[in-house]
Amino acid sequence: MHLRAYSALSGSYPVSTMKVLFDYVMPFDGYTPHNILALEEMLGIARETGVRLQVSHLIFVGERTFKTYGDALKLIEQAAKDGVDVKFDTYSYHCGTSRINVFISPWFLAKVPGAYNDKKMLARLEKELTTIKRFLGYGYEDIQITYANNDALNKYNGMFLTDIAKQRGVDPFVNFTDFARLSGGTAAVLNHRYSNMEIVEALTRHPLSIFMTDAIPALEGVQNPACSGAFPRFFQLAREKNLAPLEEIVYKMTGAAAERFGVKNRGLLREGYAADITVFDRNAVRDNNTLTKTDMAPWGIDAVFINGRRVLDQGKPDPSIRAGVVLV
């Protein structure tokens, strides 16, 4: 289940959010961060209904939200102790894919495209984005364009908005609205500062976590590094940081996910199960992606079999083999 908020301040709670945005007040005493409110809501529903709860990609958007991860884990742990069937997804990166319009408030989007010519509306939107930076620790420097979806702007694919603004010689806010306006709000982005290494390590170790990539291969533009690097990075971090035994890391990305979502006859090396197999070197497997090179193949993976057919040999994929099937 996707929470209503993954940051300490969110438009999902409009009354308190508007007060903070326009009064420039952050009421820490007695103030519950919005991502914690959202988690409490979902756990409350699970308690009342008995439904199984899978918290989707537990992230903490913005530096000011990072400190809430301990409270979030305590809430989940207590719910599990109380009998709630709850687990959460996590991935090994600090970024996630979205569209540029995710940063624009509904009141502005409701008036698009005319809003882009309204000075008062633009001033209000700029004030909101400035406040987000001030109180969440999240800004233009954390937004990486992966596909601008505009012929004049596609040359900036892979760059961060602050660097693009400097190169274009325009104000950062004007630069941001240009990408939103000229792409029709569809410019693909990677949002960074979703967590830090302390959080990644804590969630990797946690007994209630299940691994995921939160990534879809991009047909155009720059790839999300998690597509090729999320699971190799889990192996790498576990090995270098001694986070968990190899068997646990493998299970969290295979059998645990299959069992949690009721996918039959997959996720384990067992007679009668689908032969989905990855052959890797436990001492060499690692992610090779960087901030600017996000489609790098990992090291240490020798072979991959899907439904018994070899689709990767010595690290080289064979795109002619279409071995996948739809899982219902």
Image (cartoon, grey):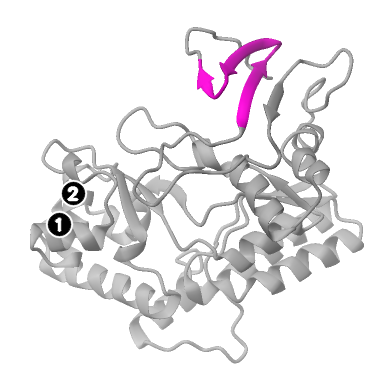
Name the kind of residue labelled 1 in the image: Tyr
Q: Is residue 211 magenta?
A: no
Res 249 quadrant in image: top right
Say the numbered circle drawn on residue 181.
2
Q: Position of residue 137 (x, y in %)?
A: 42, 74
Label 1: how many Cα within 10 Å (few below 14, some 14–19, many 20+): some
Label 2: how many Cα within 10 Å (few below 14, some 14–19, many 20+): some
Identified at 77% across, 26% down, the residue is 263
**Front residue of this view, candidates 15 and 63:** 63
Res 150 quadrant in image: top left
Q: Quadrant of the C terminus?
A: top right
Q: Position of residue 224 (x, y in %)?
A: 43, 41
Say the numbered circle drawn on residue 287.
none
Left or right placement of residue 133 versus residue 172 in this view: right
Q: Position of residue 214 (x, y in %)?
A: 55, 42
For the residues bearing labels 2 and 1, Cβ distance under 8 angstroms: yes
Left or right placement of residue 265 versus residue 184 in this view: right
**Front residue of this view, candidates 309 and 297:** 297
**Element type where label 1 sits in the image:** helix
Instruction: Give the magenta-colored segment's residue range.
Output: 301-317
Say the numbered circle drawn on residue 116.
1
Query: Which mark is first along the chain, 1 or 2?
Result: 1
Furthest residue to the bottom?
29
**Element type where label 2 sits in the image:** helix
Furthest residue to the front?
283
